[in-house]
Amino acid sequence: MEPTTQREINPPYPAAAYLPERINLFADQLPSMDEIRKLSEFVHSTESNELSFSQQIEANMGKSSPKTLLSVGIGLYILARFAEAAQMLQKATDCKEKYIYLAFALRRMGKFEQAIENLQKSLDYGADTLSIALQIVATYRVAKNFDAAAKELKNLLNFEKVSAEYHYQLARLQESQGLYDQAVGNYKIALELTPNHQRALFHLAYRCDLSGDEEAAIDYYKQIASRQDPSSPDSGDAGPGRAGPVYVNALLNLAVLYEDKGEFDNASQCVDLVLESHPNHQRAILFKKDIESSKTMVYDEEKEKKKSHKNQILETPISDFELSVRSRNCLKRTNIQTLGDLVRTTEAELLSYKNFGETSLKEIKVILESKGLNLGMALEPAPSFLLSQESRGAETTEQSPTEDQGITNKLVDDLQLSVRSRKCLQRLNIRTISELTRKTEAELLGCKNFGVTSLNEIKRTLGNLGLSLRSLD
């Protein structure tokens, strides 16, 4: 594939063509839904536009006419201030726009039943029947009520091979249900019907990336970056008027793929394009630092081969060895599963566990000696055993007793991590959340191309589940 140039991935349209004053949310007549989409695209195209628009909304916040409340409510939704938007819209003039944007705000707040009620109310004021039906499908899907979403779609079969939105929503539902091949097929049909459907293109790119077809993913992400158009349809989970993140996320995912291929200049260029319009984008800022660090990393193939051999030994499961029932049960209770876990544990720690005695200790020592290892050697300050970054980490005792085993036994794929984080975990052969929580920050950062951005994402994701990486304290 030819290296991507800045010209290839720069948006081909001038953002100034969609200046806010040309689409005035506070004009006597409310702009059309399509015009509001274009306004939102302009607002999210740069941080300065977001700031200017936010100031315009604030200037009208104190006004109490139903028409102004409607405009302010829609503006607050565009700014992702969903609770405030819902509060304003509930007091606004009754119209289809009120109920549609109120539904979108409620959906983002997790109030799915109320969102559906408001979508249905919009039909009484002339909202498009197909569009609302598909938004109801999306709401059920986001609420994880897949049966209800499928039932709604069955009522729309006459739009098969006719509506790109129908196939997009069908694909999103299939993807949520794990029907990935069928989802890819419907994303492609959506693009055949509407070639510039940005969300269908983004999800198709992401699905190709997850399935290992990186060349196809790169091509699709490049299409998003070069075709981005404010007039493109946008009826995904967020609702109309919030397409901006698609372009940014496509560039950042594209940067990840370029970095994995060693094309650091192309990766930097993608991130730079994001930072040009969003200079305070935290993910892009951290990603930029990670890419620069990757450029200076020296890869020693022979050293990596040696590390790989040591890793294979250290990753050997304890279950591969003949142990007494008592020893096996004690190790299981302390969550020691591999030889690597043992060399990060001292004799004193083992003997401190209930029912673990000298007999079990001797059994363990014999196993380790057969592999040239011994207890606690990974904790020794002497550099005689150079444990690789890819196998170092769990240097404390068992996991937190508050961990929910049902959660930790799930696959890391269920965490919906970014492309970069997912690839790094694959390199470390981390398959389950339990395996991830036994790693330390240092171990993860030791993986090639794993940086602060990915670390923060993983820590945040685990924190949301009440879990964390293992600590060296």
Image (cartoon, rainbow, N blue to C red):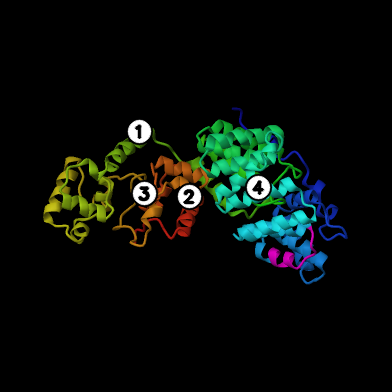
- Mark 4 highlights which residue? 236
Q: Is residue 214 left or right of residue 446?
A: right
Please state the extent of the stretch shown in magenta in the rendering: 85-95
Among the two numbered marks 3 and 4 on one chain, the one whose residue lies closer to the N terminus: 4
Given residues 247 and 282, the one toward you in this image is 247
Q: Is residue 258 visible?
A: no
- Mark 1 highlights which residue? 302
Depth check, mark 3 against mark 2: the one in front is 2
Given residues 96 and 218, the one toward you in this image is 96
Badge 3 crowding class, 10 Å Cα cut-off, few under 14, some 14 to 19, many 20 or more, is some
The disc labelled 3 sits on which kind of residue?
Answer: Glu
**Horizontal and vertical percent position of residue 451:** 48, 48
Q: Secondary structure at mark 1?
A: helix
Q: Secondary structure at mark 3?
A: helix
In the rendered image, residue 89 lying in the magenta stretch gets the answer yes
Which disc, if any, is residue 383? none
Q: Residue furthest top?
A: 1
Q: Secondary structure at mark 4?
A: loop
Q: Is residue 346 visible?
A: yes
Give the Cα distance between marks 4 and 2: 21 Å
The reply to whether discs 3 and 4 touch (Cβ–Cβ < 8 Å) is no
Note whether 162 is above or below 366 in the view shown.
Answer: above
Give the Cα distance between marks 1 and 3: 27 Å
Among the two numbered marks 4 and 2 on one chain, the one whose residue lies closer to the N terminus: 4
- Mark 2 highlights which residue? 415
Give the Cα distance between marks 1 and 4: 48 Å
Residue 87, quarter of the rendered image: bottom right
Badge 4 crowding class, 10 Å Cα cut-off, few under 14, some 14 to 19, many 20 or more, is many
Which disc, if any, is residue 435? 3
